[in-house]
Amino acid sequence: PITLPMDVDKIAFTGSSPVGHKIMEMAAQSNLKRVSLELGGKSPLIVLPDADLDQAVSAAHIGLFLNMGQCCCASSRVFVHD
């Protein structure tokens, strides 16, 4: 697993809570690497450097406020590459 090698300094994971727990356990067994987790239904919208920013803003707005934000896939977190 990618969490065990000593030359990996950080793990970022988006997904389920059970897998996040396993990642934390394995990261602690190696070099106690830093871990960033987005777990349990907080659907992120990730904006990459080559994205059309106007489209990304529109998608973020629709993604959060569609159905008044009451859906399991509401993009309630936005990560923009810096």
Image: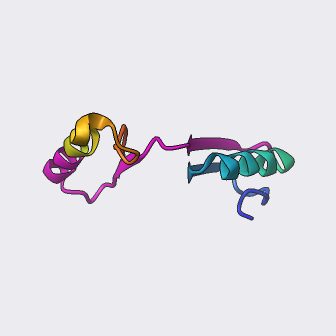
Q: Quadrant of residue 80?
A: top left
Q: What colouring style does the render use?
A: rainbow
- Is residue 46 visible from the viewing direction of this image? yes
Residue in the picture at 16% in, 53% down: 55
Is 66 one of the magenta-colored residues? no
Residue in the picture at 33% in, 55% down: 48
Residue in the picture at 65% in, 48% down: 10
Residue 61, percent across and down? 20, 40
Question: Between 82 and 41, which is closer to the camera in this rendering?
Answer: 41
- Is residue 9 visible from the viewing direction of this image? no
Question: Is 63 left, or right, of 46 in this rendering?
Answer: left
Residue 29, percent across and down? 86, 48
The magenta stretch is 32-59
Is 37 one of the magenta-colored residues? yes
Residue 25, percent across and down? 80, 46
Residue in the picture at 41% in, 45% down: 72
